[in-house]
Image (cartoon, rainbow, N blue to C red):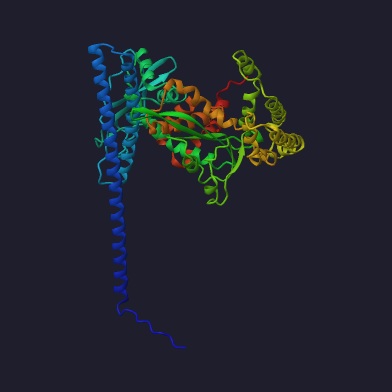
Amino acid sequence: MSSKRIDLPADLAGAYLALLSEREMLQAERDLVAAERNTAVAHAAIAQAMLSDSEALIVRLELAIEKLRRELRGQRSERTARLIDQMELQLEELVMAATEDEVAAQVAAAEASNVRSFTRKRPVRKPWPENVERERRIIDPPTTCACCGGERLSKLGEDVNETLEEIPRRFIVIETVREKFTCRDCEAISQPPAPFHATPRGFIGPHLLATILFDKFGMHSPLNRQSTRFKSEGIELSTSTLADQVGFGVAALMPVFDLIESHVFAAERLHGDDTTIPIQAKDKCTTGRIWTYVCDDRPFGGKAAPAAIYYASSDRRGEHPQKHLASYSGILQSDCYNGFEPLSVAETKAVPITFAFCHAHARRKFFELADIQKSARDRKRKGKPISPIALEAVQRYDALFEIERQINGLSAEERKAVRQEKSKPLFDDMHEWLKRERATLSKSSEVIGPIDYMLKRWDGFARFLDDGRICLTNNAAERALRGIALGRRNWTFAGSQRGADRAAVMLTFITTCRLNDIDPKAWLADVLDRIADHPASRLHELLPWQWKRLREPEKAQDQPIA
């Protein structure tokens, strides 16, 4: 066997240095490309922030012009008043969007060292009234010089930051004082670092910001109404100022939203549903959707914390829930909407979603045809009598729901055993009865619709018999959407798609707190107070259920000993 001779360079040291030089050049090129990319991203973010700021300014000026015209010429019509209200809602959405873009631009500019950050020009804020109660909080001054360690410090002056905070039934301006000291040995100036604030400049305290956020998204009170309420209490906070603070608050809470999202889609079983939400568009409102996915294992004794996640979309096309559920492969309880995961999507996934349909939806269709009271009222107006088949279907369902009440909270294995013993015979008999009745009905019968609704999807309805984790209904998701349906009358519509997305983020926090028996306002206030300087490695401590668990020892210590 002959081996081929390898020609080595005569000067190995020179070749090695050349190789190192080439690597350094490649690394320099990579660094240059990364810097150019960061610069381009920063310029794009700054341009978006400037555009959002300009849009907000235009609407603010249009609103001011319309108000001046109204003062000059008087109220022309009710339509003009509605137009001003609409413009105020549009302004608050644009200001919040501009603030979020400003935060994004500042983050992008920080990554590109050669790009100057963008800061919006805001209206001059009026000083706080002199009759507002003030509390002076002095940060402990330094005891030694930060430069030389000397202890001969002399007070030079102080910096005072005023933060408007809310205490129930009264307002207070907190003056956070940072005293300055100069060293008599080396004349260096020492001063404590400035504290972190929930929002830049810190003139809105975390408790007040939590109140604003909770009232808007939890109590469905638009910012223009909140501004009017503050004014009646002697505090001037314009709608644009409130919108600016809401934008900062939502941006600060986004890391917690991402953690809740991961927790929800890691669940073995989810409840999914959606409801309509009007979204303002050009010259009209479009019918958008708010989607929710709820994980709640308490009905089958699960230990995972309950939580809910919300998303907003401009329509009900299936691409939206398919995007939400792209990586999910557990059990989804829902109505029979086929947009969650059609066959074409399921074929592309390693483990497709297992669907369990809501029996409350199926029972409701029969109940509408068997509502005795409604039929009695309609009969006075020559309405149709009740359907005996629908009435019997409701009675059969009532027997199944009674069994479910008895096993609620038991383990999944115990629930499955009871269902196999008690529910399965009833449900199988119901299946045979529905098929017999369906064969005897004419095509014009109203009860055919509810029967076909079940028979065509029987496997999905029967899945609860073989899995104790599945609930009989999708009421967990419906309860999560009930507040939106009740609040639509107050806020009328979302000002934009981004406004709907912002509402979905805040509804995630509020509903998750309520599912864990936590006051959403107290949680928001504490998290907004801590999140600015909270270590990223301990961000999970701010999740509502973790936050509650960590506070229980503190509550136990505060309780008096009997």
Q: What is the x, y in percent for residue 498?
A: 38, 33
Q: What is the x, y in percent for residue 505?
A: 45, 33
Question: Residue drawn 27% across and 36% down?
Answer: 51
Q: What is the x, y in percent for residue 508?
A: 49, 32
Question: Residue drawn 36% across and 16% down?
Answer: 228
Would residue 21 appear left or right of 359 to someone viewing this image? left
Asked where in the image residue 56 lies, by quadrant, the reply is: top left
In this view, the residue farthest toward the bottom is: 1
Q: Is residue 353 visible?
A: yes
In the image, 203 versus 90, the foreground residue is: 90
In the image, 234 versus 394, the foreground residue is: 394
Quadrant for the C terminus, please: top right
Asked where in the image residue 121 lies, by quadrant, the reply is: top left
Question: Residue drawn 57% across and 47% down?
Answer: 352
Instruction: Give the vertical position of 303 relative to 134 (above or below).
Output: below
Q: Is residue 192 visible?
A: no
In the image, 352 versus 528, the foreground residue is: 352
In this view, the residue farthest toward the left is: 72
Would residue 105 appear left or right of 459 to someone viewing this image? left
In the image, 152 versus 326, the foreground residue is: 326
Marker count (numbered): 0
In this view, the residue farthest toward the top is: 74
Would residue 289 appear left or right of 382 to someone viewing this image? left
Q: What is the x, y in percent for residue 480?
A: 54, 29
